[in-house]
């Protein structure tokens, strides 16, 4: 959840580290620090500078890095897990006299046990963090051979980690290792890098290597060497990242969230177009024969956050199109409830980053039970992409804002593609229906753009009701799944209390919360459920609610009930989520802006949740 950057090269390291960390601010953090190695009086010295709060504080302290000299260093943005946000708890952490200095993402689960062991050996702790135990344990084992010490430490610790390490007597060298927490290696003519994510180093290189669990990296400005736990050298391949640096910049937009909302037509088209050839859906990367698809008797979908909401939509779509029963689980619950899966269950896991800790654990649990796993991810070479039996990549490009928009939309269309392919192969939809669905899919980018072109009405509404204290989203069927995502977007970036309910549950308690002035967003895109939804809106309206109606063009009776109505273009009802979610994203964004909040970096949240 935190950010790591490391650089060993020919240029001053501190400015590069700070710039890299600025590209990782979306991951969420409460403090930051850098450690840079230099020579002083012919002796190696590692200078550590740490600061509370936003990165600009650290930049001011170091004059944007120009006050800290040296060409090899590591940097970190911390999101507190052990110990409150403070300078002492900020990374990097180090041993006495800075013989060993490191940064760490993840959690060391047995740190209390390690701390007691180290204190008995005479070590004194300066922080409350689990990471300091890792630094001091490494120091206790270090006898001049970094690889040997790292391997010994890995045998003692439990948990998840990505670690970048400097040894004072190994000038110009960074060591790194990971387990269950993302870490990439980059190489360029100006030097070599470690980082938590691609945007941190994209300005300098697009050549990256995704290291696997328990692999160790030794990195200098001239050379990158990979080792296994036997300290034997191993060979790794580098991948060319197709994103350009501009894709990870704001491009004239005030916030990344707005930019990424506006990128949805292109992202959806990019995800669809390679998989639709002459009117046929072709997903070669699935690696599944028609017979295997026909033999599936159940789908188990697992995800977290917005990806979970995609799964909720997918349940309606896949059951309707493909005739396969679908179970949906939050990844954090799936692995602990001893799920009962049939022999022919296909497990589908969805994650933008491909590194979400609970989702990755669900994948591993499913494979351990002998089930085939399909991953839907956005990041090539990520852990889920590597470990799943097959992968369907969404082609959203880099998503920087913490609140997902275009990744959610591309995950949705990936599910639509699966539904149509499975439905055709299983004989659940006719050739005529299939052809119409494919045509409608190809129209989605244009229809999303039409919604964006009419954003002014939503902006006006957001400015008028940014003072709202409670907002309820209600819907039936697919509209309930849409409501869940709309509610999450609002609470993520505006800090307004918001809940989503199945509209049919109103009388089972929820309606008691509705009072004069409460905003209720009624989503009604499903034709067969429209009248029932209208009835629910009448119920909340009669109790004083301000009703915002969201429906398709043509359903003008909504205006008889709603105080304000947003219309989206008509589409196949299975695809309605892709259109209805866009006004809800814009509503959340403009309310957040109206309240003067940090849209791209909401408090307490992180982009990639890489710990449980």
Image (cartoon, rainbow, N blue to C red):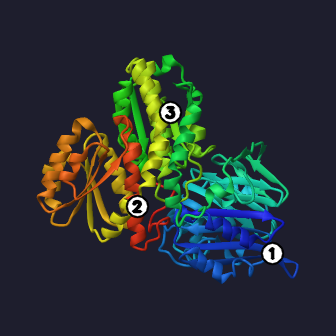
> Residue at horizontal 47%, vertical 54%?
404
Under circle 3, the secondary element is: strand
Q: Label 3 belongs to which residue? A: 373
1 and 3 marks in contact (CB < 8 Å): no
Q: Circle 3: is it few (<14), some (14-19), or many (20+) Cα within 10 Å?
A: many
Under circle 2, the secondary element is: helix
Please state if 361 lies on the left or on the right of 485 as rendered.
right
Please state if 385 lies on the left or on the right of 492 as rendered.
right
Task: State the separation of the CA atoms marked 1 and 3.
Answer: 48 Å
> Residue at horizontal 31%, vertical 40%?
478
Q: Label 2 belongs to which residue? A: 456
Give the percent coordinates (x, y) of residue 194: 70, 58
Residue 153 visible in the snapshot: no
Give the percent coordinates (x, y) of residue 428: 37, 20
> Residue at horizontal 67%, vertical 71%?
18
Which mark identifies residue 413?
Answer: none
Which label's residue is closer to the chain start, 2 or 1? 1
Which label's residue is closer to the chain start, 1 or 3? 1
Residue 182 visible in the snapshot: yes
Please state if 583 lies on the left or on the right of 105 as rendered.
left
Which label's residue is closer to the chain start, 2 or 3? 3
Please state if 603 lies on the left or on the right of 45 as rendered.
left
Frontmost residue, 63 versus 77: 63
* Image quadrant in which you'd find residue 295: top left
Under circle 1, the secondary element is: strand
Q: Label 1 belongs to which residue? A: 38
Q: Circle 1: is it few (<14), some (14-19), or many (20+) Cα within 10 Å?
A: some
Give the percent coordinates (x, y) of residue 539: 13, 53
Frontmost residue, 398 versus 391: 398
């Amino acid at each position: 959840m935190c950010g790591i950057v490391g650089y060993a090269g020919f240029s001053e390291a501190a400015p590069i580290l700070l710039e890299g960390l600025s590209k990782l601010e979306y991951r969420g953090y409460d403090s930051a620090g850098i450690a840079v190695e230099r020579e002083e009086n012919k002796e190696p010295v590692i200078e550590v500078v740490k600061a509370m709060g936003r990165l600009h504080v650290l930049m001011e302290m170091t004059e944007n890095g120009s006050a800290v000299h040296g060409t090899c260093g590591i940097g970190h943005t911390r999101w507190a897990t052990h110990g409150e946000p403070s300078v002492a708890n900020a990374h990097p952490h180090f041993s006495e006299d800075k013989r060993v200095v490191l940064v760490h993402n993840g959690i060391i689960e047995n740190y209390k046990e390690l701390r007691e062991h180290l204190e008995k050996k005479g070590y004194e702790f300066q922080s409350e963090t689990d990471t300091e135990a890792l630094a001091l344990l490494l120091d206790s084992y270090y006898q001049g051979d970094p690889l040997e010490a790292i391997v010994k430490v890995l045998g003692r610790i439990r948990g998840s980690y990505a670690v970048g390490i400097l040894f004072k007597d190994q000038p110009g060298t960074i060591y790194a290792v990971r387990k269950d927490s993302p870490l990439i290696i980059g190489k360029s003519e100006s030097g070599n890098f470690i980082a938590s994510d691609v945007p941190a180093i994209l300005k300098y290189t697009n050549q990256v290597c995704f290291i696997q669990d328990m692999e160790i990296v030794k990195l200098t400005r001239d050379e990158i060497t990979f080792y296994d736990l036997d300290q034997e050298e191993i060979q790794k391949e580098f991948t060319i990242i197709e994103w350009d640096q501009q894709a990870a910049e704001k491009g004239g937009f005030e916030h990344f969230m707005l930019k990424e909302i506006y990128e949805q037509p292109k992202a959806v088209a990019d995800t669809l177009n390679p998989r639709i050839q002459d009117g046929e859906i072709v997903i070669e990367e699935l690696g599944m024969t028609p017979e295997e698809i026909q033999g599936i008797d159940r789908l188990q979908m697992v995800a977290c956050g917005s990806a979970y909401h995609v799964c909720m939509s997918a349940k309606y779509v896949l059951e309707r199109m493909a005739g396969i029963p679908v179970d949906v689980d939050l990844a954090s619950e799936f692995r602990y409830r001893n799920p009962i899966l049939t022999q022919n269950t296909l497990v589908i896991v969805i994650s933008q980053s491909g590194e979400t800790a609970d989702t990755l654990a669900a994948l591993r649990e499913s494979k351990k039970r002998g089930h085939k796993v399909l991953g839907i991810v956005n990041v090539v070479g990520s852990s889920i992409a590597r470990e799943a039996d097959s992968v369907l990549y969404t082609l959203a490009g880099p998503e920087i804002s913490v609140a997902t928009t275009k990744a959610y939309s591309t995950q949705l269309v990936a599910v639509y593609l699966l539904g149509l392919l499975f439905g055709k192969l299983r004989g659940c939809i006719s050739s005529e229906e299939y052809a119409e669905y494919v045509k409608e899919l190809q129209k989605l980018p244009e229809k999303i753009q039409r919604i964006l072109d009419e954003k002014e009405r939503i902006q006006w509404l957001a400015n008028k009701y940014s003072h709202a204290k409670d907002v309820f989203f209600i819907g039936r069927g697919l509209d309930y799944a849409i409501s869940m995502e709309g509610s999450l977007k609002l609470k993520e970036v505006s800090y307004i209390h918001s809940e989503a309910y199945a509209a049919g549950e109103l009388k089972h308690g929820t309606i008691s919360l509705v009072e004069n002035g409460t905003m209720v967003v009624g989503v009604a895109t499903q034709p067969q459920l429209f009248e029932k939804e209208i009835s629910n809106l009448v119920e909340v309206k009669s109790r004083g609610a301000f009703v915002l109606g969201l429906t398709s063009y043509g359903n003008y009776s909504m205006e008889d009930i709603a105080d304000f109505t947003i219309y989206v273009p008509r589409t196949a009802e299975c695809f309605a989520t892709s259109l209805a979610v866009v006004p809800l994203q814009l509503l959340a964004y403009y309310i957040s802006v109206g309240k003067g909040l940090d849209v791209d970096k909401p408090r307490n949240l992180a982009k990639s949740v890489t710990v449980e």
